[in-house]
Image (spheres, rainbow, N blue to C red):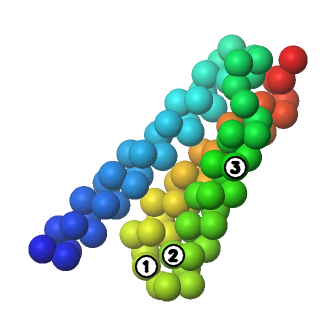
């Protein structure tokens, strides 16, 4: 059961990261981040980056890899906000 749940969490963690990528795509396509909160996404970035580091510290590859995806996505959003905030 544990192996199944690890696979399940890898899929859920990875797909949950899509929210960051969808927001980043929207910002870069529209070249606008007027309605997006920088503070919210900086907090999100710090959160997922911290979970990623924790995954390394406890040697949990599911936690690490799912949060690598989230960290990259959140960073893309923060960069997009900084580039296109009006």
Q: Residue at x 41, y 52 (%)?
A: 14
Q: Which residue is mark 1?
A: 60
Viewer-side label of 2, 3: 3
Mark 2, other Cα within 10 Å: few <14 / some 14–19 / many ≥20: some
SS at badge 3? helix
Q: Is residue 2 left or right of residue 69?
A: left
Mark 3, other Cα within 10 Å: few <14 / some 14–19 / many ≥20: few
The alpha-carbon separation of the residues under discs 2 and 3 comes to 18 Å
Q: Residue at x 49, y 85 (%)?
A: 58
Q: Quadrant of the C terminus?
A: top right
The alpha-carbon separation of the residues under discs 3 and 1 comes to 23 Å
Q: Which residue is mark 3?
A: 43
Q: Residue at x 55, y 37 (%)?
A: 21
Lower position in the chain sequence, tag 2 or tag 3: 3
Residue 7 image point, x, y percent: 25, 64
Residue contact between numbered discs 2 and 3, judged by CB atoms under 8 Å: no
Residue contact between numbered discs 2 and 1, judged by CB atoms under 8 Å: yes
Looking at the image, residue 78 lies above or below residue 67: above
Looking at the image, residue 32 lies above or below residue 55: above
Can residue 28 be spotted in the picture? no
Can residue 63 be spotted in the picture? yes
Lower position in the chain sequence, tag 2 or tag 1: 2
Q: Is residue 69 left or right of residue 41?
A: left
The alpha-carbon separation of the residues under discs 2 and 1 comes to 5 Å
Looking at the image, residue 49 lies above or below residue 44: below
Q: Which residue is mark 2?
A: 55
Q: Residue at x 61, y 73 (%)?
A: 53
């Amino acid at each position: 059961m544990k192996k199944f749940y690890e696979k399940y969490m890898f899929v859920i963690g990875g797909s949950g990261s899509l929210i960051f990528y969808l927001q980043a795509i929207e910002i870069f396509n529209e070249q606008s981040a007027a309605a997006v909160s920088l503070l919210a996404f900086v907090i999100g970035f710090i959160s997922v980056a911290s979970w990623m580091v924790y995954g390394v510290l406890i040697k949990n590859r599911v936690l690490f890899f799912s949060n690598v995806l989230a960290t990259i996505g959140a960073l893309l959003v923060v960069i997009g906000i900084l580039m296109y905030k009006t």
